[in-house]
Structures are given as structure tokens and as C-alpha cells.
Image (cartoon, helix red, strand yellow):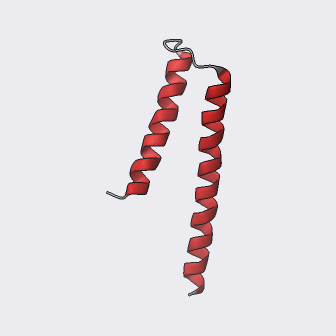
């Protein structure tokens, strides 16, 4: 299995688990921490999509 797929799946699972636990009030996560984790995940997703689009564009030019 590709490492990138495993890492993305783990990050998505981590964010979902944190959000569910936070909203179920099982574990109170400070809003700053939750916002930071979600923000970093969003930035990483955007950077990955941009990198993938550029890579595919270069591949099409070759």
C-alpha cells in the first residue's frame, strides 16, 4: 500500500475522531487546538491538490 494513502487516511481519521469526541463532549479539546488541527489539515490538503495538479500538468506536457 502506498505510504501517502496511509498517511492521508490516518490524518482524516484523526481529525474525524477529534471532532466527534469534541462534539460528543467525551473529551474537551480547546477550540484553538481543534481549529489549528483543522486549519493545518486544510492547508495540507490544498498544497497536496496543487502539487498533484502541477505534477499531472507536467506529465501531460511530456
Image side of residue 4 versus residue 36, left or right? left
Q: Is residue 57 above or below residue 42?
A: below
- Quadrant position of the C terminus in the picture: bottom right
Residue located 47% across and 34% down the image? 14
Picture quadrant of residue 60: bottom right
Q: Position of residue 26 (x, y in %)?
A: 48, 12
User: In front here: 36 or 46?
Assistant: 36
- Which residue, as the protein is rendered here, is positioned at the far left? 1
Is residue 8 shown above or below 18?
below
- Number of numbered labels in the structure image: 0
Name the residue located 58 percent from the left edge and 57 percent from the top edge: 48
Residue 54, how many percent across, how many down? Answer: 62, 71
Query: Residue 10 at what x, y percent from top left?
Result: 43, 41
Q: Residue at left 65%, top 48%?
A: 43
Residue at image coords 43%, 45%: 9
33 and 54: which is toward the camera: 33
In terms of image quadrants, where is residue 59?
bottom right
Q: Quadrant of the N terminus?
A: bottom left
Amino acid at each position: 500500500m502506498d505510504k501517502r494513502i496511509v498517511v492521508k487516511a490516518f490524518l482524516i481519521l484523526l481529525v474525524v475522531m477529534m471532532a466527534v469526541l469534541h462534539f460528543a463532549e467525551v473529551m474537551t479539546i480547546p477550540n484553538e487546538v481543534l481549529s489549528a488541527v483543522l486549519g493545518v489539515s486544510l492547508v495540507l490538503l490544498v498544497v497536496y491538490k496543487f502539487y498533484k495538479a502541477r505534477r499531472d500538468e507536467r506529465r501531460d506536457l511530456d
